[in-house]
Image: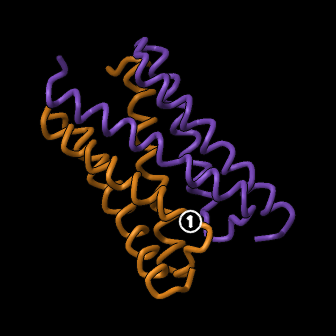
Chain colours: A orange, B purple
Amino acid sequence: MMSVTEVIGYTAATLTTVSFLPQAILTIRTRDTSSLSLSMYSIFTLGVLCWLIYGLYISDKAIIAANAITFILAGIILIYKIYNVLAKKN
Amino acid sequence: MMSVTEVIGYTAATLTTVSFLPQAILTIRTRDTSSLSLSMYSIFTLGVLCWLIYGLYISDKAIIAANAITFILAGIILIYKIYNVLAKKN
């Protein structure tokens, strides 16, 4: 059986990972990125990539899985933002 | 001296924490939250709160510090979004 600490940890990891799904869906559907910060998504995506590499280094499957998903979702949002900035849409 | 793994871990934690600062500044300055997902910021802020509780449970200062900062920044953005939704601005 999982301890209370483990339950809180897995809940935390699931929530922060899953949270980027509605943002990615909204961004893909509306293509609107006007109020999204380019700096935030650049720094955040790079940070998540570092977490992924860290997870690979210490062979932690939970860290690898959570950050692989977040990297894809944040990466999609970042690509839309960069496209809109380059297209001068915002 | 820190190992390569530790350096990558601290870099990852710093980047994902610091990334929310430019988003919070942009949101405070423009008050525009039209392309921000309410679901994302609700789920994410709750998730970061769980990370903070997890850090307190296992007495990990790095997890506590990183998530306390992220909780404040994501919380500010969430409050602006909720205000705009209630004010029917978006």
Image-based side of B81 in relation to B12, left or right? right
Q: Chain of mark 1?
A: A
Residue A64 on image: x %, y %: 22, 44
Q: Is residue A73 above or below residue B54?
A: below
Disc 1 on helix, strand or loop?
loop
In which quarter of the view is residue B83 placed? bottom right
**At 47% across and 88% down in the image, what residue appears?**
A87
Q: Amino acid at mark 1?
A: Leu
User: Is disc 1 surrounded by few (<14), some (14 to 19) or many (20+) residues within 10 Å?
Assistant: many
Residue B45 on image: x %, y %: 58, 42
Residue A19 on image: x %, y %: 49, 53
Q: Which residue is mark 1?
A: A36
Count the marks.
1
Image quarter of the C terminus of chain B:
bottom right
In which quarter of the view is residue A80 placed? bottom left
**At 40% across and 59% down in the image, what residue appears?**
A42
Image-based side of A82 in relation to A33, left or right? left
Residue sticking out furthest to the front: B1
**At 48% across and 79% down in the image, what residue appears?**
A85
Q: Is residue B65 above or below residue A74?
A: above
Residue sticking out furthest to the top: B59
Residue sticking out furthest to the right: B87
In which quarter of the view is residue A9 placed? top left
Image quarter of the N terminus of chain B:
top left
**At 31% across and 56% down in the image, what residue appears?**
A71
Q: Nearer the viewer, residue A8 or A85?
A: A85
Q: Is residue A19 above or below residue A73?
A: above
Image-based side of A15 in relation to B68, left or right? left
Image-based side of B32 in relation to B12, left or right? right
Residue B37 on image: x %, y %: 60, 63
